[in-house]
Image (cartoon, rainbow, N blue to C red):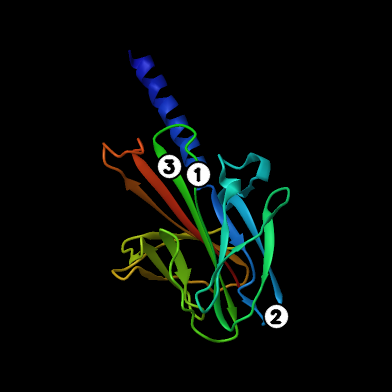
């Protein structure tokens, strides 16, 4: 009886580790944070777990994640679906900036459920500034992670409302990982001092009602942003 219990515990731990590994993967938009009017601005999208230094080939992406759509929100609020081209381990594309102010690249893709009772939603954003000027943006993703242009303050919102007590994980270029908790207004000040790439990520799991028509028990959401300094 004891051996059986021990084996069951080991199997449970192994399955838990596998699940955590899957959950740690997310979509990430890589792009420069600044551009100029009339300039072609490039971006790349990866499916990766940067904590494990694991960037997946497109052929190995989970479920139908490769079918994601990427949208460009202009400073005046225009919403444009962008084309993307598949490469070995990422997708790439570009846009031309025609306005001054803040552009946002946004992805929100809920993967097709292959098995189990949890759906996985991958959200990613990138902010690109053309000179000065404030954006007139409407948040498009259910879980949103954004930042102020001239500070290290991050904002987290959930279904359009500030999300307090959310944990923002930051992985720095030195491979050190730190957590920051948002306050009542969904904001957190994050220390980003050195140069390099910083990977910011926040997650939230929504438990559904037992009689939910989808047959699901939960929706796991992730929002990411890459900051280059």
Distance (Cα) linking label 1 and label 2: 35 Å
Question: Could you tell me which residue is drawn at 62 percent across and 53 percent down?
Answer: 46
Q: Secondary structure at mark 2?
A: loop
Q: Nearer the viewer, residue 78 or 131?
A: 78
Residue under label 1, please give it. Answer: 111
Question: Could you tell me which residue is drawn at 50 percent across and 75 percent down?
Answer: 77
User: CB under 8 Å between callouts 3 and 1?
Assistant: yes
The quadrant the N terminus occupies is top left
Q: Secondary structure at mark 3?
A: strand
Residue under label 3, please give it. Answer: 119
Q: Earlier in the sequence, mark 3 or mark 1?
A: 1
Q: Position of residue 131 (x, y in %)?
A: 60, 85
| Name of the residue lying farthest toward the bottom | 132
Given this view, does label 3 or label 2 mark the residue nearer the observer?
Answer: 2
Q: Position of residue 205 (x, y in %)?
A: 36, 48
Which quadrant would residue 144 be assigned to in this image? Answer: bottom left
Distance (Cα) linking label 3 and label 1: 7 Å
Q: Position of residue 129 (x, y in %)?
A: 58, 78
Distance (Cα) linking label 3 and label 2: 40 Å
Q: Earlier in the sequence, mark 1 or mark 2?
A: 2
Question: Could you tell me which residue is drawn at 67 percent across and 52 percent down?
Answer: 90
């Amino acid at each position: 009886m004891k051996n059986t219990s021990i084996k069951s515990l080991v199997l449970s731990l192994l399955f838990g580790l596998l699940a955590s590994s899957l959950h740690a993967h997310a979509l990430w938009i890589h792009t420069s944070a600044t551009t100029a009017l009339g300039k072609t601005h490039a971006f790349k999208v990866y499916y990766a777990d940067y904590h494990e230094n694991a960037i997946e080939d497109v052929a190995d992406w989970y479920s139908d994640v490769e079918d994601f759509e990427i949208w460009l929100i202009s400073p005046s609020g225009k919403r444009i679906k962008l084309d993307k081209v598949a490469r070995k381990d990422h997708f790439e594309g570009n846009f031309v900036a025609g306005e001054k102010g803040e552009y946002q690249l946004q992805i929100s893709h809920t993967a097709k459920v292959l098995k189990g009772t949890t759906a996985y939603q991958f959200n990613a954003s990138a902010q690109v500034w053309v000179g000065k000027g404030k954006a007139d943006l409407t948040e498009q993703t259910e879980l949103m992670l954004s930042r102020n242009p001239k500070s290290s303050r991050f904002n987290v919102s959930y279904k359009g409302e500030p999300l307090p007590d959310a944990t923002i994980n930051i992985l720095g270029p030195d491979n050190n990982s730190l957590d920051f908790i948002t306050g009542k207004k969904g904001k957190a000040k994050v220390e980003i001092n050195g140069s390099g790439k910083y990977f910011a990520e926040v997650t939230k799991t929504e438990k559904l009602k037992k009689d939910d028509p989808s047959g699901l028990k939960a929706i796991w959401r992730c929002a990411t942003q890459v900051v280059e300094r």
